[in-house]
Image (spheres, helix red, strand yellow):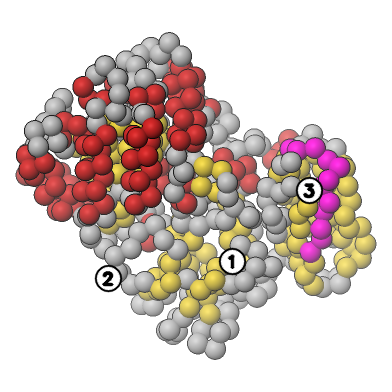
Amino acid sequence: VEIESLGGYNSSEPEEPSEPILMVNYTVDNELIITVDPGIHMDYGLSYPLTYEIEIPAGYSDLHAYKSHSNRQEWIALTEKSSNDFFNGIEAVRFDYTSGLAYVSASFSSETDSIYIKICDTKNENLPIVYGRICEYYDDRKAAVTSSADDWADSGDKIWYQSDEAFQITCRQFRKYHLWLSCGIITQYCNAATWQNIQTQLDSGYVEACSHSRMHSYGPYDDPLGEIAGSKQDIFDNLDLPASFKSGEKEYVYTWIAPANYYDDIVNSLVGENKYLVNRRYNWPFDRFAEWNYDAGYFHTIGISREACPIWEGTTDLSDLNSYFDEVFAKGGIYHVMTHPYFLLENGFNDAHYAWEHLEYISNKTNIWYVSVGHLYLYHYLQGNEPLTISVPNSKKRIVPEFVLDQNYPNPFNAFTHISFQIFKKTRVQLSIYTINGRLVDVLVNEDRDIGFYSVRWDANKYSSGIYFYKLDAGDFSRLNKCILIK
């Protein structure tokens, strides 16, 4: 078994990965299976839905889409939406019968690394479907809008650290317009009351908890690890993050907001090592996706489109804010408005009318994706990696693989997991388990099998935690998948 040929543990290794992050497969029952690399799943959670463009046969109407995470789970009907509906970041389906397309938005579960999708007619029969792509934006929207705010804290020797009340007001204003606000928290300057107020805003929705360091140092940092890794741990220790920033019991902070815009090689390395996805700095205008930084293991630093604020290079000119939004929208870009809530409200709520009027101007449009900074780049991380398609049906006849090996369930797992496979002709089958070093440790199946679906239980009680590989050999077919044992 040439384990080395599989490439790195996940895509954030120094060089570009040779193996795909996602794989697309089909079953003989016209079901689409999308499987993610288990290491990537563990690193980033993937609880935010991606939108998959799927070709549907012509001449149909009144179709229904379903998802599952295993062939042993019940099918869940996806809520149908239209292009006239306002919705963001939910699991749903939108049918475009004129173009022969379905836009299926679905997220991964903590229990498995796979999503099963089927589309049924009025007789509840599965239709032949063809995977197309992951849409650039959620629900194939024209443009995206995201927002961020800096310096949430309530103690310290700088005036802008006294910002707790201002953040609460600002969060409520953004939420009023259904706009996400990604908030940079200075964790060591938050007292118990501040943490509780942050939690209240998280629970109320449309708020992302981002790390803005522990001390807001101007750099170079005396304790880089504490500022970058420690601040993230402070968020985990003091907050219960929303479901879209969790996978099972594990929580995720995707966004590092650079304090004082500071950046050096140490920061670059530690941001990637600690599994942040993106480093937001203050440079602007910036209205596109950043590219993945293979050396550092996260996206290249991003900037903002405009700051709505009366300080530094911010603007209080409503006309300028609105016209630049129009410019970004016209070219299908990403509009990123940010602010410093303390200075936004320093002279009173009414003096910030330009900001609130701008929020009203950019909000509640059905052809725009409204999203947090972290989810924007979580989505783009997968969308930017073209899946490997195992079998591709054409418009007339489906090309069915001779064998299918599913992702094990559950994964990661403790002690027990199930491995499923399908064979479409009678043949000799061997299902084996290997360590990450390629050492054979178990053989689960080694016999002739007839056509059919099989599920095999692996008891891993006697093995230590780590990454394992299970390999299916069936005739001329051979396939290797990863699984993760955690005790």
Q: Amino acid at mark 2?
A: Asn
Q: Amino acid at mark 3?
A: Ala
Q: Nearer the viewer, residue 242 or 392?
A: 242
> Is 460 covered by the magenta stretch?
yes
Label 2, secondary structure: give it. loop
The numbered disc on residue 415 is 3
The answer to whether residue 476 shows anywhere in this view is no
> Which residue position holds label 2?
84
How crowded pointer 2 is (Cα within 10 Å; few <14, some 14-19, many 20+) is rated as few
How crowded pointer 3 is (Cα within 10 Å; few <14, some 14-19, many 20+) is rated as some
**Magenta stretch, residue numbers:** 455-466
Q: Amino acid at mark 1?
A: Ser
Residue 117 percent across, percent down from the top left: 56, 68
Label 3, secondary structure: give it. loop
Between circles 3 and 2, the one closer to the viewer is 3
> Which residue position holds label 1?
68
Q: Quadrant of residue 7?
A: top right
Q: Nearer the viewer, residue 49 or 111?
A: 111
> Is 8 covered by the magenta stretch?
no
